Amino acid sequence: MSRLVDRYRRVLGHLLPRAAVWLLTLVATALLLLGPAVAGTVVAVVALAATVWWRLTTVGADRHLVARAVLVTVAAGVAARSGGWSWPLLSCLAVLLLGLMAEPTVAHATRPALRVSGLPGFSLPLLARVPEPLFLGVSAGATVLTLGAADAALPVTLAAAVSLALLGLAVATYQLFRERTHATERAVRTALTSLGPAYCLYYNGVPHGAYQVRMWLPYLKRTGRSGVLVIRDPRFFATAAALGELPVVLARSVESLEYVAVPSVGAFFYVNNDAKNANGVRFGGITHVHLGHGDSDKPASYSATTAMFDQIFVAGQAGVDRFAQHGVLVPREKFVLVGRPQVEHIEVRRPDAQLPEHPVVLYAPTWRGSIGDSLFGSLRHGERIVAALLAAGATVWFRPHPYSARDAESRVLISRIDTLLTDSAPAHRPSTATAAMTVFECMNGSDVLVTDVSSVASDYLYSNKPFAITDTGVVADLVAEYPVARAAVLLPVADGDLTAAVADLLGPDSRRQVRAETRGYYLGDWPPGEYADVFVTAAARAMTPAS
């Protein structure tokens, strides 16, 4: 049962609130129609309150229009049964039902094109801050009408219900006027111009991808320049605001981006390959820099869409060569070698260091991927990999990719591996334990790594420690396609026994020399004390317009 809940946790999270509101609505309807009316009124008010709470606290929440329409209709019917149909009652019912039908359109029309957090000098008028006023007005009107079904003074009740709905419509109209005159966008632009940001860090994605933004914030901060985090997906807004490092601007539309690109902005930095990056790249007079979110041999690291940027920051020469090796022709002058500044947090071990008798092995599989050429995730083989490591006497730390939490099957696989580790010995660390650690803390605490084709492998090179890469059978010759695999022990998880490969990984360190050569090729050879400064200098240079 627990695995079933684990598998469909996200689905249940979406369905249960809706089911609760519908159940309350059905109970309220039955009580209002059949009696007692007072009990029905109480349940109806609870149902409406649950609808309002769910709607205003959850991004993309179901509007429950039908549920509230049923409550309004039934309440009006009971009120009519008590005092007879009348023009006031019919007028009130018409206003509320029209409000329900108009609500989605009004909410879309009055939705601010720009939403801001932490921007100095920006504030909204009080009425402009009311979230979806028509929704609140109609809900309040429906509540009052429902209370009227419990033999309250009907004329007063109806007047209050209509007044609340019309008040919500009036505030929504005011907000519509502001949006149609671009009042919010102009106010945001004025505040941004006053702030004078030198760069925009650009991201389109969901909260699970916050690490793609977070990893660059400290290094952009070291440039000493002010910046703004520009996001495109409203689901990420709360997470972005909680980062607290930069002012956040949510730009829902392409047009609204015009107000963000103020004259002081010298560079846009992009942290992934999202299609909406093209909306930002269209601005001339700004240097558009692709940072990505890790150096790996995955197809995402040599995507043809990367050619649209003015500069492509890569860690080492491998980042340049992989484009040409895969037939993606990008002018050499677009590439800037900046190292991988985040690896400054990785402790470097002497190349000749020996492994302890029971080494700590970090198993860090990448996510399953979404398209055929990037299905490198080994999580489906994870139980067998972990079992082989345990049989060899290793202590295992398990850290799956953050995106794995989005997938039902992956959550079940993670749960199985966690169970295997917790049932074995307390020294092992399941995903629940490593989730409280940074990936670099996991790397520093380990002696050996088992991972997939991902940036984790490239980062681990910096440590001088041995590592293995899983061969999931996606390509015929993994080493030829992905050169980082030359420095790794290959685990044939697709169709082979793991015993020999694990023994090699935990034994004589046969890849030591190749690993040292590959380290410089992928990560550069800058001195440790100056390593991160290479990126900081390049980023600051990109923010400065060419003279």
Image: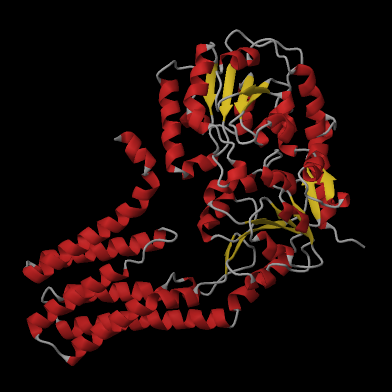
User: Can residue 38 be seen here?
Assistant: yes
The structure residue drawn at horizontal position 59% and vertical position 74%, both measured from the top left corner, is 184
The structure residue drawn at horizontal position 18% and vertical position 63%, both measured from the top left corner, is 26
* Along the line of sight, the residue nearer the viewer: 453 or 458: 453
The structure residue drawn at horizontal position 71% and vertical position 29%, both measured from the top left corner, is 479
* Along the line of sight, the residue nearer the viewer: 69 or 248: 69
* Placement of 473 over or under 216, stated as above or below: above
Give the quarter of the image for residue 442: top right
Give the quarter of the image for residue 185: bottom right
The residue furthest bottom is 87
Identify the coloring. Answer: secondary structure
Q: Position of residue 293 (x, y in %)?
A: 67, 44
* Along the line of sight, the residue nearer the viewer: 108 or 334: 334
Quarter of the picture holding the C terminus: bottom right
State left or right for residue 528 relative to residue 260. Answer: right
State left or right for residue 167 relative to residue 287. Answer: left
Q: Position of residue 82 (x, y in %)?
A: 8, 80
State left or right for residue 123 relative to residue 272. Answer: left
* Placement of 260 over or under 462, stated as above or below: below
